[in-house]
Image (cartoon, helix red, strand yellow):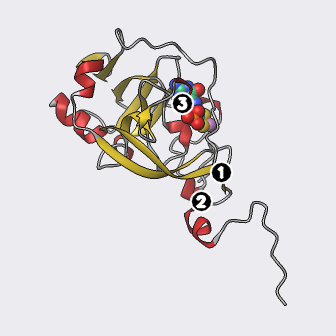
């Protein structure tokens, strides 16, 4: 007679194929922030696209919400080892944002900059082509402030530290410039499937 197996953190067969190496599945939604949640007023909120210091485009809350809206269901992976499956997000894809700005991307790298002073670098190749969005809704409701509301970057195929909360701008940079965590020992790119956690991981 079969004995019921050890459960604990052992993933189901489905979870096993969806979990990057070293990750476990969680059903709650942990909050990870470097400091207190900034108060971001929708009346003064804006999202600015820059090429270095030069402003390419800027949207206030109404203009941003008038851009094409997209909903995605994606798995997310935090470098602290939790993964969460089938999270649902709505917002404006980076492709639609660049199209609305009416500019060809001037460089191959971006820094995502946030209202709390956080920043993180992302190659253009990791945000264009249907890979990232500026999300305003989670699970059908406006994004909670603690999870980055009014708007956060969502780059679900990279470790979740790349998904900058309280986003205020995206800036094209001439090189791949390290952001907050990348300057503090974390990998420049952060692909969970390659387990790119720390600076010197291949
Ligand atoms: N602006 C900002 N964005 C941020 C952070 C932060 O401290 N400030 N923390 C990052 C880290 S380390 C992680 S793991 C995720 C956590 O997102 P969550 O709190 O919604 O789970 O946000 C990322 N984005
Ligand atoms: Mo994190």
Query: Label 1: which residue?
Result: 26
| Marks 1 and 3, how far apart at CA | 16 Å
Q: Is residue 173 above or below residue 194?
A: above
Query: Label 2: which residue?
Result: 20
The residue at 29%/49% (across/down) is 129
Among the two numbered marks 1 and 3 on one chain, the one whose residue lies closer to the N terminus: 1
Image location of residue 106, percent across then percent down? 24, 33
Viewer can see residue 104: no
Image location of residue 103, percent across then percent down? 17, 31
CB at mark 3 closer than 8 A to ligand 1? yes
Q: Is residue 160 above or below residue 147?
A: below
In terms of depth relative to the viewer, which is nearer, 202 or 37? Answer: 37
Indicate left or right for 183 with 106 as reference. Answer: right
User: Residue 39 got which mark?
Assistant: none
Q: Is residue 191 above or below residue 153?
A: below
The residue at 73%/65% (across/down) is 10
| Mark 2: secondary structure | loop
Residue count near mark 1 (Cα–Cα under 10 Å), binned few <14, some 14–19, many ≥20: some
In terms of depth relative to the viewer, which is nearer, 159 or 43? Answer: 43
| Mark 1: secondary structure | loop
Spot the residue most to the bottom: 1
Image location of residue 42, percent across then percent down? 37, 14
State ligand 1's quadrant. Answer: top right
Indicate left or right for 182 with 110 as reference. Answer: right
Image location of residue 141, percent across then percent down? 43, 34
The residue at 22%/37% (across/down) is 68
Q: Quadrant of residue 97?
A: top left
Viewer can see residue 155: yes
For discs 3 and 2, the disc positioned in front in the rendered view:
3
Query: Label 3: which residue?
Result: 147
| Mark 3: secondary structure | helix
Image quarter in which the C terminus is found: bottom right
């Amino acid at each position: 007679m079969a004995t019921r197996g050890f459960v604990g953190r052992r993933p189901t067969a489905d979870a096993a194929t969806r979990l990057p190496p070293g990750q476990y599945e969680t059903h709650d939604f942990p909050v990870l922030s470097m400091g207190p949640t900034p108060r971001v007023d929708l009346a003064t909120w804006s999202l600015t696209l820059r090429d270095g210091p030069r402003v390419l485009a800027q949207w206030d809350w109404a203009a941003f919400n008038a851009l094409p809206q997209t909903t995605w269901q994606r798995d997310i992976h935090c470098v602290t080892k939790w993964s969460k499956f089938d999270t649902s997000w709505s917002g404006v894809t980076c492709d639609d944002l660049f199209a609305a700005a009416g500019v060809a991307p001037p460089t191959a790298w971006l820094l995502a900059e946030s209202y709390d002073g956080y920043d993180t670098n992302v190659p253009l190749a990791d945000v264009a082509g249907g890979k990232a969005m500026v999300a305003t809704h989670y699970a059908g409701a406006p994004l909670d402030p603690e999870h980055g509301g009014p708007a956060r970057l969502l780059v679900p195929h990279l470790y979740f530290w790349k998904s900058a909360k309280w986003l205020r701008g995206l800036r094209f940079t001439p090189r791949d410039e390290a952001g907050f965590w990348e300057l503090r020992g974390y990998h420049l790119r952060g692909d969970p499937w390659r387990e790119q956690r720390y600076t010197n991981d291949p």
